[in-house]
Image: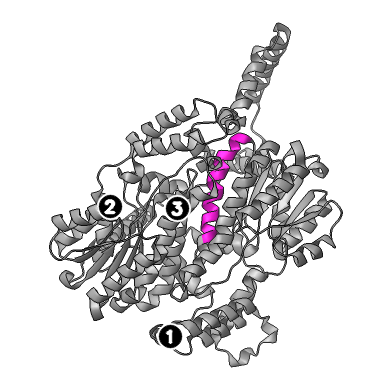
């Protein structure tokens, strides 16, 4: 055994020595390579611009302000090209792309570093409205997508690099606001782009910094932001948090920032430089001791562990149910009369002899002859058995008064939402089913009892959500809303990222992410009143980004939003659950819709893109989709290669038409006393996709390419 551990240790040491040696090599001809960097006014972008200029690269620095542009021109060499850039303005992004195209000529662009970002407003989610989320998502996520799409053909021409600056908070969502959501989205975009660009020789890398002293972590800016948001809060919300909350939060924030913030920005810049200049860059870089040793390990922990740590280190609202329970227990002890206290003390004393007797018990026959190690194993198994039994018991405890509780479900025209509305109606809940169309509402109403109401709701329209809130408030009265199920969603367009336009990403994100945020924020007061349940339908594609388009980005964002909400709303007695379905046969996975959309995109692609993929790419791609989704018996597999047979077999195993596996999870989250944090519906989610999401990127990429239909461009 000892020798085996020595061998393993030696292999690990050899691996790191080999990796260190391999990563030393740098690309030649730096003076002929162009690097485009966004967000160069200050911070990481500014330092990287100067650093790469010294190394000899031809840097194109995108600055938001004229002052930042001029300062860089004064500091750097004549190789530098500084230009004005607003990543949220499509015209500005396009103008910058045209300038770059004229500069690089036929050589192409070696690298783009998507660094521009903002971090405020950041606050508890119930302090914010949908308009507080939009600006940050526009800069941190949509800006990254817009800049990347604008110069991707130039990157492909040079077989270069795309370097996306995310954050450790793209792996673990610790606070409210759009920052974590946007960085989760960047991670998803980065992963799908990496897999899509690999056949073209383009490397896509991700930087995940911890806490560094930049404008993003400026305490004074954070304090000003907090005060501004606090001043606009309604008095009811201020009373919930307490008048001293803002001062306590400021004190804790300052202590944490001073303790963990790193002032050495070169740790991040060196990672960026390596991603740009190394012959063999890493897929991910995590600069900062806190990122490597704390945040990333914490992101792999079960939710109850990360929740406990984060909640312990945040300021609690005045009305926190956690605090109220503790105070009630202390008061009950103080209020005890002498007789009651004496009885409790006597019970404790009487328990002592039993403890002493237990210590004198002889060893059970089954344990005789066993070594100490074997006894420990037996004890361990018994403890595990007790834990499992307790978990199953706790998981099965049902709430009472179901027939008095109201549940709102979005996206009830078809699919999961439609089935969930009917299922919860039969269970006895008062269901308010929100449908997009009158036809969907009428069909659902005809199949449910009088308890079920249908309303029209467009989750992309704030005024429509407002009307729904007013209706639900009138219906529920003082009871509040017990459950909100955010189920509405779309999947199309999906496909290679290079085929997409910005409006394609916005279309999906507006429904699947912004719709979830807007609906939740507007209904939150009613949920808090009932101390109810929030159920957000994400996807296994919120854990693993395997397709292009906005779908994975949106579901990653829903995961981040749900995690931060869960840790905040626990103080108000509201429980937040996430549903992560695997592959199910719904309109979201309808091949007819997906095929029609892909054909339309293919016809509109530029000639050079079609040439890069090959004339037969779309035809072969669609064939694989059909083989993968049709029942094996209905296809003439004798005409298909063994590879296609394997693809068809694997995809038929992965998909299921039993939608009740998902709706049963929704019902469980709404009807038990202790709902789970996450529900992974479908065997493929539990045993394939979720475990796959924990693997290193290289291993995950290989397995995804083996499991899912793919066609290599010509």
**Magenta segment includes 564:** yes
Would you place residue 407 above or below residue 234 in this image?
below
Q: Is residue 709 above or below residue 169?
A: below
Q: Are marks 2 and 3 in contact (CB under 8 Å)?
A: no
As helix, strand or loop, the secondary structure at mark 2 comes to: helix
Dot 1 or dot 3: first in sequence order is: 3
Crowd tier of the residue under label 2, counting other residues whose Cα lies within 10 Å: few below 14, some 14–19, many 20 or above: many
* Residue 44: image tag: 2
In the image, taking residue 186 as reference, residue 373 lies left or right, namely: right
**Most distant residue in the right direction:** 450
- What residue sits 78% from the left and 53% below the top? 424
Which residue is at a point 39% across and 78% down the rendered structure image?
A: 199
| Marks 1,3: beta carbons within 8 A | no
- On whether residue 354 falls in the magenta region, the answer is no
Query: Range of the magenta residues?
Result: 554-572
* Total numbered circles: 3
Q: What is the image's colouring?
A: one colour
Q: Where is 36 relative to 252, above or below?
A: below
Residue bearing mark 3: 135
Q: Percent position (x, y) of residue 105?
A: 24, 79
Q: Nearer the viewer, mark 2 or mark 3?
A: 3
What residue is disc 1 on?
Answer: 610
Side of 53 where 127 appears, left or right: right
Secondary structure beneath label 3: helix
Q: Which mark is residue 73?
A: none
Q: Position of residue 54 (x, y in %)?
A: 14, 60
């Amino acid at each position: 055994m000892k020798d085996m551990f020595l061998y393993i240790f030696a292999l690990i040491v050899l691996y790191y020595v080999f990796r260190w040696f391999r990563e030393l090599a740098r690309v030649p001809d730096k003076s002929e390579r162009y690097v485009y960097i966004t967000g160069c006014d200050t911070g990481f972008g500014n330092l990287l611009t100067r650093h790469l200029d010294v190394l000899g690269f031809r840097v194109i620095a995108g600055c938001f302000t004229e002052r930042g542009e001029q300062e860089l021109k004064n500091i750097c060499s004549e190789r530098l090209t500084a230009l004005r850039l607003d990543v949220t303005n499509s015209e500005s992004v396009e103008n910058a792309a045209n300038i770059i195209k004229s500069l690089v000529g036929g050589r192409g662009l070696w690298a783009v570093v998507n660094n521009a970002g903002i971090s405020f407003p950041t606050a508890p989610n119930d302090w914010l409205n949908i308009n507080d989320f939009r600006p940050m998502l526009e800069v941190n996520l949509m800006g990254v997508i817009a800049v990347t799409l604008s110069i991707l053909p130039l990157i492909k021409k040079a077989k270069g690099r795309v370097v996306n600056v995310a954050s450790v908070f793209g792996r673990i969502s610790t606070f409210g606001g759009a920052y974590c959501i946007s960085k989760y989205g960047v991670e998803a975009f980065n992963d799908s782009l990496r897999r899509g660009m690999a056949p073209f020789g383009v490397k896509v890398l991700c930087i995940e910094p911890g806490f560094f002293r930049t404008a993003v972590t400026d305490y004074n800016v954070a304090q000003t932001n907090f005060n501004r948001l606090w001043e606009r809060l309604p008095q009811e919300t201020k009373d919930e948090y307490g008048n001293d909350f803002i001062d306590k939060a400021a004190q804790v924030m300052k202590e944490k920032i001073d303790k963990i913030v790193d002032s050495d920005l070169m740790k991040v810049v060196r990672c960026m430089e390596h991603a740009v200049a190394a012959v063999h860059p890493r897929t991910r870089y995590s600069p900062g001791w806190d990122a490597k040793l704390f945040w990333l390990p914490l992101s792999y922990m079960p939710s109850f562990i990360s929740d406990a740590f984060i909640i312990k280190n945040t300021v609690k609202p005045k009305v926190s149910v956690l605090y109220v329970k503790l105070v009630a227990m202390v008061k009950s002890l103080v209020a005890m009369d002498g007789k009651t206290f004496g009885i409790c003390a006597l019970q404790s004393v009487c328990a002592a002899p039993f403890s002493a007797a237990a210590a004198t018990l002889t060893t059970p026959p089954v344990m005789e002859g066993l070594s100490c190690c074997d006894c420990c194993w037996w004890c361990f198994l018994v403890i595990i058995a007790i834990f499992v039994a307790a978990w199953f018991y706790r998981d099965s405890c049902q709430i009472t008064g179901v027939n008095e509780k109201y549940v709102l479900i979005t996206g009830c025209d078809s699919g999961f939402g439609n089935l969930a509305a009917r299922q919860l109606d039969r269970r006895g809940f008062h269901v308010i089913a929100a449908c997009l169309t009158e036809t969907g509402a009428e069909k659902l109403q005809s199949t449910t009892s009088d308890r079920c109401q249908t309303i029209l709701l467009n989750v992309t329209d704030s005024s429509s959500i407002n009307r729904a809130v007013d209706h639900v408030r009138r219906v529920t009265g003082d009871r509040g809303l017990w459950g909100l199920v955010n189920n509405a969603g779309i999947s199309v367009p999906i496909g290679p990222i290079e085929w997409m336009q910005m409006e394609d990403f916005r279309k999906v994100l507006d429904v699947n992410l912004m719709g979830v945020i807007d609906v939740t924020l507007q209904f939150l007061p009613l949920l808090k009143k009932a101390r109810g349940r929030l159920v957000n339908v994400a996807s296994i594609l919120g854990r693993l980004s395997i397709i292009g388009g906005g779908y994975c980005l949106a579901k990653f964002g829903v995961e981040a939003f749900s995690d931060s909400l869960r840790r905040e709303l626990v103080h108000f007695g509201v429980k937040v659950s996430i549903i992560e379905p695997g592959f199910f046969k719904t309109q979201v996975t309808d091949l007819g819709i997906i095929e029609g959309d892909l054909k339309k995109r293919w016809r509109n692609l530029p000639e050079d893109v079609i040439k890069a993929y090959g004339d037969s790419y779309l035809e072969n791609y669609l064939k694989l989709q059909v083989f993968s989704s049709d029942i094996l018996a209905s296809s003439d597999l004798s005409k298909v290669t063994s590879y296609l047979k394997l693809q068809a077999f694997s995809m038929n195993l992965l998909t299921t038409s039993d939608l009740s596996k998902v709706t049963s999870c929704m019902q469980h989250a709404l009807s038990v006393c202790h709902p789970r944090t996450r529900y992974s519906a479908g065997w493929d989610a539990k045993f394939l996709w979720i475990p796959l999401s924990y693997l290193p990127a290289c291993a995950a990429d290989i397995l995804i390419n083996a499991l899912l239909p793919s066609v290599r461009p010509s």
